[in-house]
Amino acid sequence: MRIYDIISDKRDNKELTDEQIRFFVKGYTKGEIEHYHASALLMAIYLNGMTDRETVTLTKEMAESGDMLDLSAIDGITVDKHSTGGVGDKTTLIVAPIVASVGLKTAKMSGRGLGHTGGTIDKLESIDGFCTSLSPEIFIDKVKKHGICVVGQSGDLAPADKKIYALRDATATVGSMPLIASSIMSKKLAAGASCIVLDVKTGSGAFMKTPEDAEALSEKMVNIGKSAGRKVAAVISDMDTPLGKNIGNSLEVIEAVEVLKNGENSDLREVSLVLAGNIIALAEGISADEGIKKATAQLESGAAYEKFREFISAQGGDLRQIDDPSLFKQPLYSSDVLCAEDGFIGSMNAEMIGSASVILGAGRVKKDDPIDHSAGIILHRKTGDRVLKGEKIATLYTDSKESFDSAEKLIRQSITVTSEKIERPPLIYKVIY
Ligand code: URA
């Protein structure tokens, strides 16, 4: 078999065989296929797409390119949740303890933030002492004992994806539906959980800018998961406006704790309950409505908050910060963004707001950039809210005073003020099973 023929077949829009796909994934992972050959094939896939069978095979090969986590030592149903990435998306911190509190086993590998989107590992590491790097044995042991453990992705999980993703990034081929679906699902399959709920974001702050694209991606990923014998659902949720009011690592932990303490109704609470409810529904074979009811009861009774505290403590986190947020490292400076006119917030561009938080120090431009866990933004107004001239729309937090001007400029550009009240887009568009 020659990589040249695989490229020319895809270029001519022919369906690749399983053997051809295996040859490419194995060869490229081992370094036996040149980057220029792999680049040409990725571009042919980007332009001509892949059939469902090709996408399933590509995912399976990528998943099996490294360690496949064996969770069989864990009694009970293992569950996982994955977000396609957003701004202010701290749902894992709420969903994982809710589902663990009903007895499901959350064995979760999470990522760090990159670009305008945040990552769960950075958020958890804003808690003093919290350890996100554990051996597979300790990871499994903690899931057995506490029903929940969240760690960073292990070095050898789906190494083919790591290599292919880096090449896609450099060759303008990231935005391909089969390549995104196989990239995400290869890691989910390798991480081993039997029930997986995907939170597929749509809107200005998401990969998928339209609900139609989010639905197409969801269908592909659900199909891949089912073909691998897993139970999978995809919740399509809004990421046009940031989720919740806090953006930035410790700020997001603090907001998640407010929801877990059964704080007021909010978009964050609603999306978290739908995600948790769908995980419970998949795992227990009940309807989504019944699952959401169960999730709500766990939140309202305080059981989810108790589980959260157990989880933070089990991974070495300082519970005093959970009880008293003023004990988190505090930013040196803060600055308010005031509204320039009376009206209603017509829209908020989540990507720009995420980029403003990166400028303040909360995120990274490059993979290994350092971050400031205390930096970020609190939004005082969201899409659809009434605003008056001179009122605070947002407060910015940072250790580097020089970043205020450009962050404020971006926040102002991200927000439109209209004279008529605009309804916020739906929070949940659809659930795909
Ligand atoms: N997230 C991933 O893990 N892979 C992609 O291709 C896109 C988003």
Image (cartoon, rainbow, N blue to C red):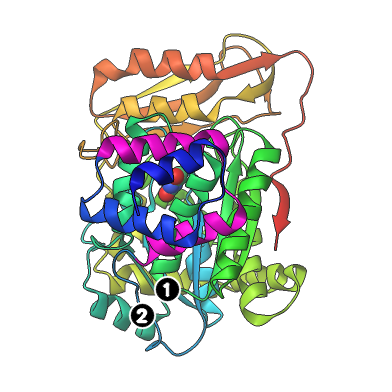
Q: Residue visible at 42% across and 16% down?
A: 408
Between residue 391 and residue 143, name the one nearer to us: 143
Residue depicted at 53% across the width and 22% down the height: 392
In magenta segment, residue 52: yes
Vertical placement of residue 174 versus 2, above or below: above
Establish if 327 lies above or below 22. above
Q: Residue, x 39% and y 68% (percent of image)?
A: 191
Look at the image and tell me whether residue 101 can be seen.
yes
Q: Which residue is tagged 2? A: 70
> Residue at label 1?
192
Specify start and end residues of the magenta stretch as a single range: 35-64
- Dot 1 lies on which element? loop
Residue in the image at 33% along x and 41% along y: 38
Closer to us: 172 or 262: 172
Sort mark 1 into few (<14), some (14-19) or many (20+) by Cα contacts within 10 Å: many
Please say if the residues under marks 2 and 1 sit with CB atoms less than 8 Å apart.
yes
